[in-house]
Image (tube, rainbow, N blue to C red):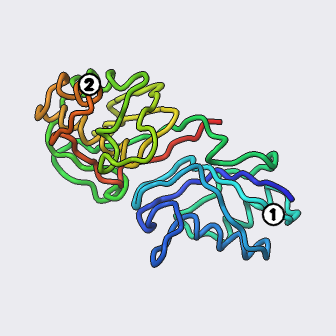
Amino acid sequence: MRNIKLTIEYDGREYSGWQRQKNAVSVQETIEYALEKITLEKTILFGSGRTDSGAHALGQVANFKTTCQLNPIKFQKALNSNLPADTVIISAEEVSLDFHAQYSANGKIYVYKILNRSCRTAIDRNRVWHVDHNLDVGEMKKASKSLMGIHDFVNFSQGRLARGSTTRNVIKTNISEMDNSIIQFSIESDGFLKRMVRMLTGTLVEVGKGKITVHDFEKLISTNEHSKHIFTAPPWGLYLYKVNY
């Protein structure tokens, strides 16, 4: 038995997300189907975690076990020949049998892209969130500093009903103004709750619009008091950038 690790890039707009679902096309199912054609085995693909419907990945990681003797480079080429154009295997490598894409991970980096200009985009309409209100990036940066360190992010988990601990350690954040009116928010943490990055991004945008203050945002991080000021950004600006091991 062999264990093969894949690093995967995908455009999520045509998918229901990473995880296999009934009556919907997922990234996991699409790659498993391609693997079965190559290995002639019923293969289970273990991902580092779910991504939302419509969200993208630049560095999703998954692994599968197989008795097929193809070397990793041939696995990569064979998979890319059998996958749709919106999904690409960036790399494939053989790893120890105890490696698991989810349980071996010690953190992830997400990136969210906002197009901040008056007119929408035609080319990148499914890859950025268009916000036509002029955002105060300086205030957004000030607010984002409160994310650093260990906090209870219960306010930033879907429905405030996340199972298990809602405490996470945020290692690094950055908000930068890119070319072509793009504002990019990146965040690295030891783990993420469902919708956490989208809720943080949406609420930081509320700060940028002046609808809530930096102090208001800091209170959302430091207390568990429910607030109507939490806003969830749409999925199409979100990218799983990297999984750390």
Provide the secondary structure element on which disc 2 rests. helix
Q: Is residue 90 left or right of residue 209?
A: right
State the residue lying farthest toward the left. 211
Q: Quarter of the image holding residue 27? A: bottom right
The residue that appears at 43% across and 47% down in the rendered structure is 163
Residue type indicated by callout 1:
Thr
Q: Position of residue 69 (x, y in %)?
A: 88, 63
The residue that appears at 52% across and 64% down in the rendered structure is 86
Count residues near mark 2 (Cα–Cα under 10 Å), then give few for <14, some for 14-19, many for 20+: many
Quarter of the image for the C terminus: give it. top right
The residue that appears at 55% across and 35% down in the rendered structure is 107
| Residues tagged 1 and 2 counted as in contact (Cβ below 8 A) | no
| Nearer to the camera, 212 or 126 | 212
Q: Is residue 192 left or right of residue 66?
A: left
Quarter of the image for the N terminus: give it. bottom right
| Nearer to the camera, 210 or 42 | 42
Q: Which residue is mark 1?
A: 66
Q: Position of residue 92 (x, y in %)?
A: 73, 52
- Image mark count: 2
What distance separates the C-alpha of mark 1 from that of mark 2?
47 Å
Q: Position of residue 56 (x, y in %)?
A: 46, 54
**Of the image marks 1 and 2, the number of the one nearer the N terminus:** 1
Q: Position of residue 112 (x, y in %)?
A: 37, 42
Residue type indicated by callout 2:
Ala
Against 24, is 119 above or below? above
Q: Which residue is mark 2?
A: 143
Against 15, is 10 above or below? above
Count residues near mark 1 (Cα–Cα under 10 Å), then give few for <14, some for 14-19, many for 20+: some
Provide the secondary structure element on which disc 1 rests. strand
Q: Which mark is residue 137?
A: none
